[in-house]
Structure formats: C-alpha cells, structure tokens
Image: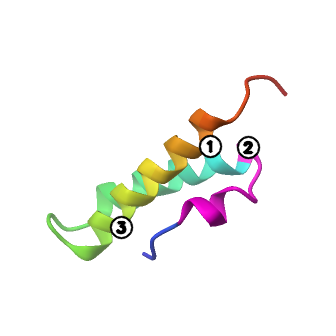
Amino acid sequence: MKLVTRFELATRSTRELHALIRDLFNELANSAPESAERRNALASLENVQAELACRPFGP
C-alpha cells in the first residue's frame, strides 16, 4: 500500500474519503505487525482524518 498524502486527499469528495477510511481499516487489519504496509495504512488513515477535520459540516 502506498501512502496517501493530504495533497491527494484534498481533491476527493467527503464521500470518497469515508470509503477510503473503510478500505484503510481493511488494509490495516490484513497487514503484518510492524510492516511497511501497516505504517503506510496508519499514516494514510491519519491523513484522511485530518482532511475530514478541516472540512465544514453539511452536504
């Protein structure tokens, strides 16, 4: 899994970000402990959460 940056996330809709969170959780659950895939999934998840936190609420 590649790291998803905030720059990439800024171009996605809120709906797409929520779908990505689901995919990242699945990736995290299937990754080996202390692996590069796990670190990238965790960092990507943090980036998605930060991007969502910066967005206004509403439709």
Number of other residues with Cα within 10 Å of mark 3, as a class: few under 14, some 14 to 19, many 20 or more: some
Between marks 3 and 2, how big is the CA–CA gap?
A: 21 Å
Q: What residue type is labelled 1?
A: His
Which residue, given by chain and number where applicable, does mark 1 sit on?
18
Q: Residue at x 63, y 64 (%)?
A: 7
Q: Mark 3–mark 2 contact, CB under 8 Å?
A: no
Colour setting? rainbow
Number of other residues with Cα within 10 Å of mark 2, as a class: few under 14, some 14 to 19, many 20 or more: few
Callout in the foreground (1, 3): 3
Question: Which quadrant of the rendered structure holds the C terminus?
Answer: top right
Bounds of the magenta span?
5-15
Which residue, given by chain and number where applicable, does mark 2 sit on?
15
- Disc assigned to residue 40: 3
Q: Does the magenta stretch include residue 53?
A: no
Q: Residue at x 31, y 55 (%)?
A: 29
N-terminal label among 3 and 2: 2
Number of labels in the image equals: 3
Report the front residue among 22 and 10: 10
